[in-house]
């Protein structure tokens, strides 16, 4: 059932500005909604997802059938597929967000001026958040919940392959909003498959989108970062490093490295490069590399690394700046912590990097000088996650330097303003 | 001495990318520079401005002569002109910034996770800041000092009319940087008058500018906001309101209104619209309007306001959204605090708004619901200023919701990262 192209374009051009205007209006209502009302909506959304499970799974089955007809590969189908457990997970995810503290209204600083005025810095919602995502339908619920918690309206634009699933989940969200007396337009789903809608969102819908959060693969994020005329919370890639210092315990280095690389290879916090201090190349390099190879990880190394095990393949210059997201690691020897920092500065992506060492001075230098969103000492890079940080949930991880950096949770989806209380003060 | 157009363009295309690369490199050095070294540079810059006073004034005299030859008006000449007092003011402004606390390295939050990892959120510099300004040469020193304090590199692009003055001031800055052992490229002045340089800065110089701060009139800010592909700290306009509630003391209302409108009419925090609660229109409106008229302020009012004094002119719909920056005010009657908030939401610019009332409930409602960077109770809108907030200095006032909002001081010119200290933790 494909509409004539002209009609689709005309529909997009007509519907998208209205979506923006309705979102802006709803954002105003949400910004002033009390915590209890937002939490009531979140509870009702979780409940609605559970009671509408059959509808959601039926919609998903249709999406899956179409995807298979169109020859989607197994990984794609897995991302798209929902089952009872995944639907239950979505509902409980919304409840986790419900349990989080409400960041809105929090006074983060306050002080009194010599003239007696008190100034408070108070968290307020950001406004309207545009979420552009690919095939995973759970993003519909996850992103909506986190935006709602922080008092923001959301405009969701999921992948066209998952549109029936997203629509069914969105119906549950709308039902939950209605039950709490919040406007349905607080969380809107872009109804068209027309890709032009994405371009209109990236242009900011005439000032009615305040920030874009892309959720998906590198090509989506790259497009969003290149084209967006509004701020973007995202990371293009996570080229994360584990640096094993000369003062590293070998056991700790092995355990951290194995976890950082192999716990899950497809996450942005997975290590992609191992750096080992030349001083301990003779003692540490071989056991670390052998451990990875034995665990099924391909190792691409410099000359020193290739010497310790015949299975190591040669690393090219490109390897140092490649995010494998797979059981592959690049490995090289460096001349101490300064050289490690210089390597990370040159090839890294300012995402997450770790030093393993018992030398406090080297650790503090690394923590201070590595310019990444997350820098760790004696801990795995796979802790790069809002949940692991204690944020309860995250909408993504940002490597930009503005506003949000690192895991983006409810607190990072707020702005602030200044509230000044006086007793008649005028400026001299 | 005008170079052939082709040569100018070629020079811009060649020089601007290099400026970006050098700034990025210098930013890295500055980010790691200790507080004492940055303060030494600031002291040396202030001193160099003083010792080079004659050179600066001579350069300024040439700029002034050219401006007058080109028929510049008096206001323009006043903005461009330096004298001994203004040069001394520039030097002492740099010293004020030197005295500010260094925001870099400040731990703003820290917590421990159940697995024993400690997480710190630490302020780090933003990176490279591009300043695009018009004829005031003092911005060269003011902006450079604030960027330097927060560990940022700066690329300064002043008005072509003040280029000789800017160059002389910049020489003093470079001398100060050198004396402290900091790279000269930390603060660069764009050497070309070619306007294409501005466009290249707005495009972000290939990722080498992290934020743009425009300093100048509305047309400059509008251009920057429309064209910039990197974040912008700015406000387009300050349509600031004073709302006189039914529970306002008339004396306090008069004093705050007179100050908010007339202390200085050309600043962004000057009031542009007076809103008076209908309940007190009979008691408060006339004395307030008469006071303004008697002080030489033109009043453009709704019907109710026109009734109280024959000198009041009729307000058009456009008046409610006009930033006069002059001795003119629009005035109208509203139906209580909700109506005042609705008026501000509709016509305001999210900059600075004030309520005058003795009713705490109305005041708290106004403070909570008016969505502006600064909201005041019983105080003048002219307190919208970094100095008045206790920030010591400001590079401008932002009305965007991202990162910095309200007065932008040294602290707002920083980002942050997370530093995690573990003892071998791996993620389950």
Image: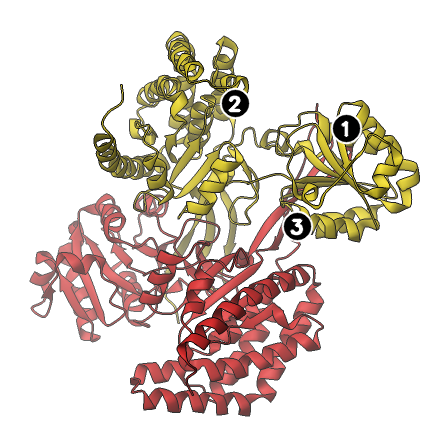
Chain colours: A red, B yellow
Disc ID at residue B96:
2
Q: Nearer the viewer, mark 3 or mark 2?
A: 3
Crowd band around label 1 with a 10 angstrom C-alpha radius: few (<14), some (14–19), many (20+): some
The quadrant the C terminus of chain B occupies is bottom left
Crowd band around label 2 with a 10 angstrom C-alpha radius: few (<14), some (14–19), many (20+): some
Q: Is residue A334 left or right of residue B108?
A: left
The quadrant the N terminus of chain B occupies is top left
The CA span between labels 1 and 2 is 30 Å
Q: Is residue A167 above or below residue B359?
A: below
Label 2 chain ID? B
Residue denoted by label 1: B258
Name which residue lies at 46% across and 60% down: A212
Residue denoted by label 3: B371
Which is nearer the N-term, disc 1 or disc 2?
2
Crowd band around label 3 with a 10 angstrom C-alpha radius: few (<14), some (14–19), many (20+): many
On the image, the x and y values in percent for residue B100 come to: 52, 28
Label 1 chain ID? B
Q: Nearer the viewer, mark 1 or mark 2?
A: 1
Tell me which corner region of the image, top left, top right, bottom left or bottom right, holds residue A82: bottom left
Secondary structure under the numbered disc 2 in the rendered image? helix
Label 3 chain ID? B
Q: Is residue A283 left or right of residue A3?
A: left
Residue B71 vs residue B201, the one in the foreground: B71
On the image, the x and y values in percent for residue B138 come to: 47, 21
Contact between marks 1 and 2 (CB within 8 A): the answer is no
Residue B222 vs residue B388, the one in the foreground: B222
Tell me which corner region of the image, top left, top right, bottom left or bottom right, holds residue B390: top right
Contact between marks 1 and 3 (CB within 8 A): the answer is no
Name which residue lies at 74% across and 28% down: B259
Badges 1 and 2, same chain: yes
- Tally of numbered discs: 3
């Amino acid at each position: 059932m494909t509409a004539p192209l002209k009609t689709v374009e005309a529909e997009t051009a007509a519907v998208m500005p209205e979506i923006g205007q309705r979102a802006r209006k709803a954002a105003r209502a949400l910004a002033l909604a009390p915590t209890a009302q937002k939490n009531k909506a979140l509870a009702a959304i979780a409940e609605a997802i559970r009671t509408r499970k059959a509808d959601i799974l039926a919609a998903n089955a249709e999406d899956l059938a179409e995807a298979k007809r169109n020859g989607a590969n197994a990984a794609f189908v897995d991302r798209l597929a929902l089952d009872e457990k995944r639907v239950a997970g979505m509902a409980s995810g919304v409840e986790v967000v419900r349990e989080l503290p409400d960041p809105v209204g929090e006074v983060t600083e306050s002080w009194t001026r010599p003239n007696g005025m008190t100034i408070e810095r108070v968290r307020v919602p950001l406004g309207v958040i545009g979420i552009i995502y690919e095939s995973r339908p759970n993003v519909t619920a996850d992103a909506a919940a986190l935006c709602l918690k922080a008092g923001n309206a959301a405009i969701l634009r999921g992948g066209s392959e998952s549109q029936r699933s997203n629509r069914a989940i969105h119906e549950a969200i709308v039902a939950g909003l209605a039950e709490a007396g919040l406007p349905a337009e607080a969380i809107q789903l872009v109804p068209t498959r027309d890709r032009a809608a994405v371009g209109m969102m990236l242009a900011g819908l005439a000032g009615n989108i305040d920030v874009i959060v892309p959720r998906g693969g590198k090509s989506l994020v790259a497009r969003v970062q290149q084209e967006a005329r509004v701020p973007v919370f995202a990371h293009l890639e996570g080229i994360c490093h584990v640096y094993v210092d000369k003062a590293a315990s070998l056991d700790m280095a092995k355990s951290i490295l194995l976890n950082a690389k192999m716990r899950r290879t497809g996450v942005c916090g997975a290590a992609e490069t191992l750096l080992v201090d030349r001083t301990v190349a003779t003692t540490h390099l071989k056991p670390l590399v052998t451990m990875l190879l034995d665990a099924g990880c391909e190792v691409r190394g410099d000359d020193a690394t290739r010497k310790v095990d015949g299975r190591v393949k040669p690393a090219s210059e490109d390897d140092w700046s490649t995010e494998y997201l797979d059981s592959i690691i690049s490995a090289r020897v460096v001349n101490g912590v300064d050289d490690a920092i210089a390597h990370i500065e040159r090839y890294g992506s300012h995402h997450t990097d770790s030093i393993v060492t018992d030398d406090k001075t080297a650790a503090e230098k690394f923590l201070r000088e590595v310019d990444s969103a997350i820098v760790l000492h004696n801990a795995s890079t796979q802790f790069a996650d809002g949940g692991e940080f204690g944020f309860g949930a995250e909408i993504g991880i940002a490597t930009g330097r503005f506003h949000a950096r690192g895991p983006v949770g409810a607190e990072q989806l707020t702005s602030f303003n200044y509230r000044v209380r006086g007793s008649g003060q005028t400026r001299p």
